[in-house]
Image (cartoon, helix red, strand yellow):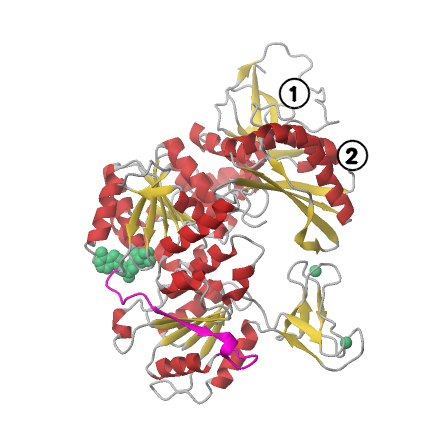
Amino acid sequence: MPYQITVMLHTPAHSGIGGALTYESEVAYPPGTLVRVPLGSRELLGVVWDAPQMRAIATSPMVEPNSHRGADKPSPPNEAPVPMQLRAVASVLEGIAPLNAHWRQLVQFAASYYQRSTGEVALAALPSQLRDLSTEQWARRLKRKVKAVNAFEENAQTIPTPTDEQAHVLTDIAAHKGPFLLFGNTGSGKTEVYLRAAQAVLERDAQAQILVMVPEINLTPQLEERFRTRFCPQWGEDCLVAMHSSLTPAQRLKNWLAAHSGEARIVLGTRMAVFASMPHLQLIVVDEEHDPSYKQQEGARYSARDLAVYRGQLVGAKVILGSATPSLESWHHSRPASGAEPARRYMRLAMPSRVGQGALPLVRRVDMSRQPYKTVFSNHLLDAIRERITRGEQILVLLNRRGYAPVLSCNDCGWKSECPHCSAYRVFHKLDRTLRCHHCGFTQPVPRTCPSCGNLDISPLGRGTEQLEEHLAELLADVRRPDGEPIRIARIDADSTRLKGELERQLAEVHAGAVDVLVGTQMIAKGHDFRRVTLVAALNPDGALFSSDFRAPERLFSLLMQAAGRAGRDAAMTLFSPCEMWVQSFHPLHPLFEALKQHDYPAFAEQQLKEREQATLPPFSFQALVRAEARSQEAAQGFLNAAREAGAALADELLVDLYPAVPMTIQRVANIERAQMLIECTSRKALQHFLAHWQANLHAMRSAHRQVMRWAVDVDPLAI
Ligand code: ADP
Ligand code: ZN
Ligand code: ZN
């Protein structure tokens, strides 16, 4: 066979093969071609990576671990190249155009930046059915390509005239290169800006494609609807496809192919969509760009937001990052369009006003230190809730916890429902009367008596959302809706929405007005356009003020602003009295709440950035974490500290700080000990340089520390 080609595969991590293998072939498949190749006794999907080479001599070819360019990781020791006969490419996936150079470069960059193998990132970015369908199944799948063109119902839609702020922002987007940080209040009409910017791109170029990313698609079904209503009448039902993890494998393949072929003009998806193959990509929107769910938390721990910015620059697509509370990183890297300040990475575009809606809610703080001991709802808040319900308005009660009274405790000896396998407490689930570990899943029936002293008096500590719902029902038992009916309280959190479709059903009930009080976790704060909500209450926000996680205040502020944005979305609902956000806190005068009261994100950001700068925390420094898992904490830390030792000289040279290994916050999960080590540097480039070289040390250490089961690097971690 005349050609030798490099193919990227997702090889098992322990194989020591970095993902690039060489095969021989009769055909000079161009880079980006999807092929099936043999590996051991299996056949795997792979992507042809480099231009095929003519084979010089047909003797002693070999597997080349990590042969691919400098960007890849150095090969681990004792997995030296194994001489073997080159095997032939088994087959090619017919009917799919090769993945283009931009896509391959995006994958290559992500792999290199996040310290993973290119093969892993490449294959993880492809729909699983490409891998799982046999050649025969694939051939059948291709024939099925003809689809029914069902006409989209053209209900007359009124497209709003842009407000002055929107018009201004759209002009800037059209005139400049970006990337843009669209700093727009909740309800300022950001989505309308995305829609108009998209419309302009679609009209300008008959092929142009648009990528719209959202944090969690299930929480914002309305967004997809708005895009469909706007674009399907003109561009057809198939102009938009979704890409997220709750699609079936078949749907995912279908949508992926539609994007890859250019047939779908708009891809709307979650973080995984950043890797969608879109050959004519011209606009990328990242909605709620500050949202932590843009960071992948396993495998290649990439930030889809950061990759979106990279991808935009790579392909020359405009990028719009939108948020009412941008991440402090994005805020720091942005400046208004005009102004004497030096040019920053992002152009900041502001939309401070709410469109055709009531004013932002009045923030009211309750000093909990002046309330009777163990108060859950202060009387003032209860009165306000009662009054609004009788007027037919809706209430959101925001609680930052999950499950029924998290921990069981013995009132005599102090026993708590610890998980025997983890350094965490098990949660009391009232529904099936179990104690359940949220980390390893270990579940047992609730004991009748204290396992430690036999005392009968064991009871829940603290309050979770389930219990709160009951408690509130008692407190409001005498309240009636305007129609004289008893009130309805609903709860939305990870537990109540575990069943498929349950979240949608519950949200629909809230929208329909069947629910008067909605109790829930941050899930209820995001994106929903609840028209009748006029009061939002945050019950226990204090934990985040004094957290060991330096990003906790940023998260809390954004959560509270988001939640506040759920109130007063319909001006007609606030004719009687302005909408309100209540915060119950033991520290009501904390600067965070002061800024919240003024709805002043810039003030909050400035204060936080000042603190971060003093402490040289991101965005004034760059971080990476190495995590290791072993049977003992000693082994996990020993491995990390040895690697630290090995990297010390290079770290010194590059001014990279290596901190000692520490146990992770959740130290033990399912009997496995976890440790981590922080790496910090004021230069991203130096940190990258260090990590790329230090990988070899980690691989080497691994063979000397056999007890270590796993280790992984997290670049730009979101929590340390
Ligand atoms: P955001 O995404 O910033 O929260 P949206 O785009 O959802 O804001 O807009 C909030 C509400 O205002 C929506 O109901 C939307 O239809 C409406 N809206 C947006 N722009 C306009 C406009 N120019 N004229 C009238 N209504 C608008
Ligand atoms: Zn006891
Ligand atoms: Zn556990």
Quadrant hosting ligand 2: bottom right
Point 44% across, 61% down: residue = 591
Type of amino acid at the residue the image marks with label 1:
Leu
Mark 2 = which residue? 704
Boundaries of the magenta span: 355-377
How many neighbours does mark 2 have within 10 angstroms: few (below 14), some (14-19), or many (20 or more)?
few
Quadrant in the picture for residue 3: top right
Mark 1 = which residue? 86
The picture places residue 126, in percent across and down from the top left corner, at 51, 39
Type of amino acid at the residue the image marks with label 2:
Ala
Relative placement, left or right, of 465 versus 516 is: right
Relative placement, left or right, of 47 versus 671 is: left
Residue toward you, 292 or 415: 415
* Earlier residue among tags 1 and 2: 1
The picture places residue 664, in percent across and down from the top left corner, at 66, 51
- In the orientation shown, which residue stands out farthest toward the top? 57
Label 2 residue near ligand 3, CB within 8 Å = no
In this rendering, is residue 716 above or below 515?
Answer: above
The picture places residue 339, in percent across and down from the top left corner, at 27, 41
| Residue 361 visible, this angle | yes
In this rendering, is residue 466 above or below 275?
Answer: below
Picture disc at residue 442: none
In what element is the residue under mark 1?
A: loop
